[in-house]
Image (cartoon, rainbow, N blue to C red):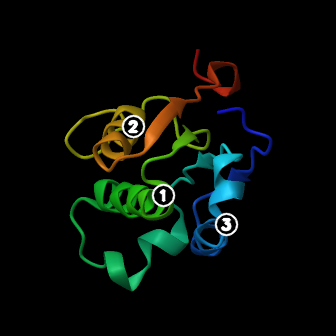
Amino acid sequence: MTPRYIPILKAMDSEIKAVAQMSNITADRTLPLFEIPRIGKNITEAKRFEGCADLTTAYLNEMTDRIASVWKGRTSMVDAFHWQPDATVESGEHIVQYIYGRLIALGVNIRPIIGYDRWENQ
């Protein structure tokens, strides 16, 4: 595959809906970079996560489910640029490893993107 279009997407509902509307021809020529936004106030206060003991895991599951719902069987890039370099899910697993492992299990072919130069913590 030689992509001709590489959109940078935050895997939010509206972007996932747009990706779902792509024709197969367009999707075949697209290699999206999905950025996983960090957990903000809108997530911590969301009704769907109210009382959730494993908020990070639940949030990352939601994000990876969204990506897989429109990109299963295809190749994408994924980045966790906005997260701290030592961020983990509640089990202690690093979020990057968790995200990649989950997406692979859901059938998405992953091309990791890690921008070490962007992290303040060397």
Q: Residue at x 44, y 77 (%)?
A: 45
- Is 49 drawn above or below residue 68 in the view shown? below
Quadrant of the snapshot with the N terminus: top right
Q: Which residue is mark 1?
A: 67
Whole-number angstrom distance, CA of label 1 to CA of label 2: 12 Å
Pinpoint residue 51: horizontal percent, then vertical percent.
Answer: 24, 76
Whole-number angstrom distance, CA of label 1 to CA of label 3: 14 Å
Which label is found at residue 100? 2
Looking at numbered disc 3 in the image, what kind of residue is underneath it?
Met
User: For mark 1, does the 10 Å Cα neighbourhood hold few (<14), some (14 to 19), or many (20 or more) residues?
Assistant: many
For the residue labelled by badge 3, is the local secondary structure a helix, a strand or a loop?
A: loop
For the residue labelled by badge 2, is the local secondary structure a helix, a strand or a loop?
A: helix
Q: Are marks 2 and 3 in contact (CB under 8 Å)?
A: no
Q: Which quadrant of the view contains residue 15?
A: bottom right
Q: Which residue is mark 3?
A: 22
Horizontally, is 120 left or right of 86 in the view? right
Pinpoint residue 68: horizontal percent, then vertical percent.
Answer: 42, 57
- Is 51 drawn above or below residue 23 in the view shown? below
